[in-house]
Amino acid sequence: MHTFGSPCFRGSGVDVRGFTAIELMVTVAVLAILAALAAPSFGSIIERYRTRQAAEDMLGTLYFARSEAIKRSGGVTVEANGGDWATGWTVKSDGVTDPIKIAMAPARVSVISVGGDGVITSNRWGILISNGLAQFHIQISPLNGSASNGSTLCINSGGLIKRENGITNCS
């Protein structure tokens, strides 16, 4: 007894199903070309995701520091690790030697505190102050990318923290 895929039925008018090796190679080649064309557009998406992740991490840390300051009656600071925000930040409390929280910034982002210094302090009412200013902003941008893929955290004197897309001056 013969099966449909056996050599005896090829060319005998019986429908043989399947793909040839050439058809599969052409399909794989077309998919490879489409993937190569789509890959560059993913670069900006990845940059935007990295900066958004860093901004959300910083935002969460600022809210955490504010909460801890209210709970501890002030004296909570957020400091740049080694004076460089791009390496991460640490939440500390006055009179406590161990940090409360340590956060690492995602790779390949630049974090700059504009109008502030390397320390953000939260008082007992949860108001954030940097370099004596209650109004400042933190810009987070990709290292070698477009500023439009960045994020800005705007901190105003009333304590409102707002994240904006792109690098802005929070006017």
Image (spheres, rainbow, N blue to C red):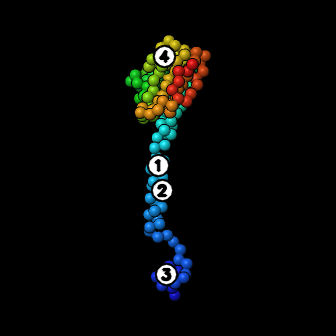
For residue 50, the mark is none
* Label 4: which secondary element: loop
Q: Is residue 67 visible?
A: no
- Distance between mark 1 and mark 3 Cα atoms: 39 Å
Q: Classify mark 3: residues with Cα within 10 Å, few (<14), some (14-19) or many (20+).
A: few
For residue 31, the mark is 2
Q: Amino acid at mark 1?
A: Leu
User: In the shown orientation, is residue 26 left or right of residue 63?
Assistant: left
Q: Earlier in the sequence, mark 1 or mark 3?
A: 3
Q: Residue tagged by mark 4? A: 115
Q: Earlier in the sequence, mark 1 or mark 2?
A: 2
Quarter-of-image position of residue 67: top right
Q: Is residue 170 above or below residue 40?
A: above
Residue at x 54% of width, y 14% of height: 134
- Distance between mark 3 and mark 4 Cα atoms: 79 Å
Q: Is residue 40 above or below residue 116?
A: below
- Distance between mark 4 and mark 1 Cα atoms: 42 Å
Residue at x 46% of width, y 60% of height: 28
